[in-house]
Amino acid sequence: MKVVVKADILGRNEAAAAENAALFARHGIYALNLLGSPGCGKTSLLEQTLAALGKELRMAVIEGDLFTTKDAARIERCGAPVVQINTSGGCHLDAAMVAAALGQLDLSALDVLVIENVGNLVCPAEFALGEDAKAVVLSITEGDDKPLKYPLIFKESAVALLNKVDILPYTNFDMAAAERDITALHPGIEVLPVSCRTGEGLDVWYDWLRAQVRAKKKQA
């Protein structure tokens, strides 16, 4: 008899994700699953976003990491509620982990929940958390070949942020090729060149996030 273990794991996760999604819908919370490799700038993007939109939108963050609370401490300094999840070696968050973390947040006081997933371009793409959308951050320093090497995460994401464009002149990153490959994998995806260090392009990201939150509120 053949036992399909992966299907069973993903099935249980989908059920838990559906429960999370229903909870977000009841509270009118826009939930974003933020993905990307270690060092691509996910936490820096969150810091800039909280600084820019923190007075406009009620935001909280769930931080996923293998070990330490370093990123959660950075978010806490921004003044946003934050819950740390340490996977102790696990390569991704799952919906049950997120459900447990939600108990530590006042959902009635939130407009936006950002779930910063474990740094990884592979495993997190397969596990839904109940989010409204996924966003992937790709650093210029990672190379323009990554979208085709790791296609699923780009196929699953609603927006791709190409970060660290301030150092583009000092690399051989082909911006046109990266954008072409990403949109070929996922026609309709938003591709946003940004720099979390200089702020370049971030206004477009903020507008994108605002639009998603407004749309979610209309559904509530």
Image: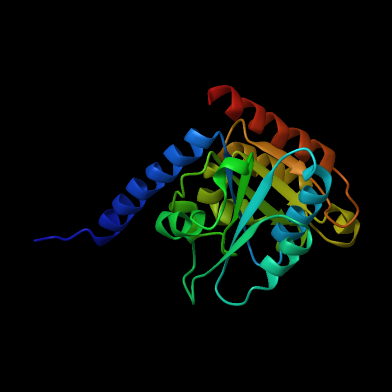
In percent of width and height, residue 103 lies at 48, 55
Q: Is residue 186 above or below residue 199?
A: above
Residue 176 sits in quarter:
top right
In percent of width and height, residue 74 lies at 75, 66
The answer to whether residue 143 of the structure is visible from this angle is no
Count of marks overlaid on the render: 0
Q: Is residue 17 left or right of residue 161?
A: left
Residue in the foreground of this view, choosing between 22 and 189: 22
Residue in the foreground of this view, choosing between 214 and 165: 214
**Which residue lies most toward the top here?**
218
Q: Is residue 1 left or right of residue 117?
A: left
What residue is rendered at 40% in x and 47% in y?
Answer: 17
What residue is rendered at 79% in x and 45% in y?
Answer: 193
In percent of width and height, residue 22 lies at 42, 38
**Which residue lies most toward the left here?**
1
Residue 81 sits in quarter:
bottom right
Q: Is residue 2 left or right of residue 150?
A: left
**Colour scheme employed for the rendering of this structure:** rainbow
In percent of width and height, residue 179 lies at 70, 42
In the picture, the quarter occupied by the N terminus is bottom left
The answer to whether residue 5 of the structure is visible from this angle is yes
Q: Is residue 196 left or right of residue 37?
A: right
What residue is rendered at 75% in x and 41% in y?
Answer: 192
Residue in the foreground of this view, choosing between 72 and 11: 72
